[in-house]
Amino acid sequence: MIVDIQFNQGSAPWPRLVEGVLAAEEAGFATVWNLDHFSGAMFGADTMLECFSVLSGWAAVTTRIGVGSLVANVVNRTSGMLAHAAASVQNISGGRLVLGVGAGSSPTSEFGAEQRALGIEMLPRMADRHARLIDTIGEVRRIWAAAGSGDFAGFARPIPEPLIVAGINSAGLARLAGERLDGVNIRFNHPERGALLAAARDASGNRPGFDLSVWTWFDPALTDGDHPLRRELAAEGVTRLVLLHRGAPDPEAIARAGRHLG
């Protein structure tokens, strides 16, 4: 099972975030992920650095570790902006990006406060939000394929195109992601975790390389493959575990976690 780490980029100033990603690379984590939010308020932070700007910065100071968004809300950018941002990070990183995307929340959700503040349209029906995610990724891929010619002359093309995974919390999106994308991610304590992962895997046709990932809170013990949660996830076919670090990155704790990686 691949083991990754995730940082909240609102949790610390930039130099500390750099220390964290360098420690993660040295420890042997496969990929470092971040968040996509405009405000740090919901995380008790005073600010929040922009998702793809941070990924570009991390890519510039590292050489091996992957970089990824978990997850980029498709309502936060137009399809063209998302395509350009992701292509830029992919090329700056030398092909180390994994693009994680999410469908966004309902207009009445507490998680939609950022979008309401900026006047970004949110869709009430879950099915419509899921359809918008799939449509957005279809448009992103169309832009990438057309980059360099015609109306898209001079546009950035990612080399190679990054894997695209979706954050899921329903069977409908699990199936859509299985059919159209390269993987899914779900929180560790979702009450239907096993069923949703199975739905995504079945919809993918069990194709090789389809990524089934779960996120949970950072705990150095979870880098040990014999940990009970690791065994439980392995039995469900999980291929990747993402450990979300609470608060500012702690290089010493990250180094301890790396003792079981490899």
Image (spheres, rainbow, N blue to C red):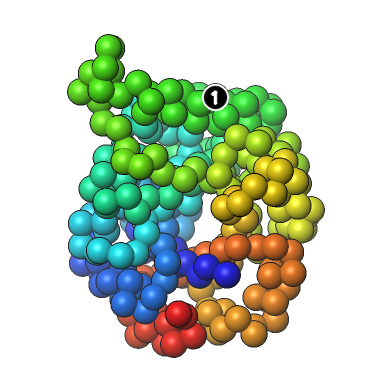
Dividing the picture into quadrants, the one containing residue 9 is bottom left
Dividing the picture into quadrants, the one containing residue 239 is bottom right
Residue 72, compared with residue 262, is above or below; it is: above
Image position, residue 131 (x, y; %): 62, 26
Image position, residue 242 (x, y; %): 52, 64
Q: Is residue 180 left or right of residue 18?
A: right
Q: Tell me which residue sits at (74%, 69%) in the image.
A: 235
Image position, residue 13 (x, y; %): 25, 63
Task: Assign the N terminus to one quadrant of the image.
Answer: bottom right
Task: Assign the C terminus to one quadrant of the image.
Answer: bottom left
Give the class, few, some or many, for how many residues have Cα within 10 Å of label 1's Cα (few <14, many ≥20): some
On the question of residue 41 being in view, the answer is no
Q: Tell me which residue sits at (31%, 77%) in the image.
A: 26
Q: Tell me which residue sits at (50%, 70%) in the image.
A: 3
Residue 72, compared with residue 143, is above or below; it is: below
Image position, residue 14 (x, y; %): 23, 62
Q: Is residue 179 left or right of residue 192?
A: left
- Relative depth, front residue between 119 and 86: 86
- Relative depth, front residue between 103 and 241: 241
Which residue in the structure is indicated by mark 1? 135
Mark 1 element type: helix
Q: Tell me which residue sits at (55%, 44%) in the image.
A: 182
Dividing the picture into quadrants, the one containing residue 170 is top right
Residue 152, compared with residue 186, is above or below; it is: above
Q: Amino acid at mark 1?
A: Asp
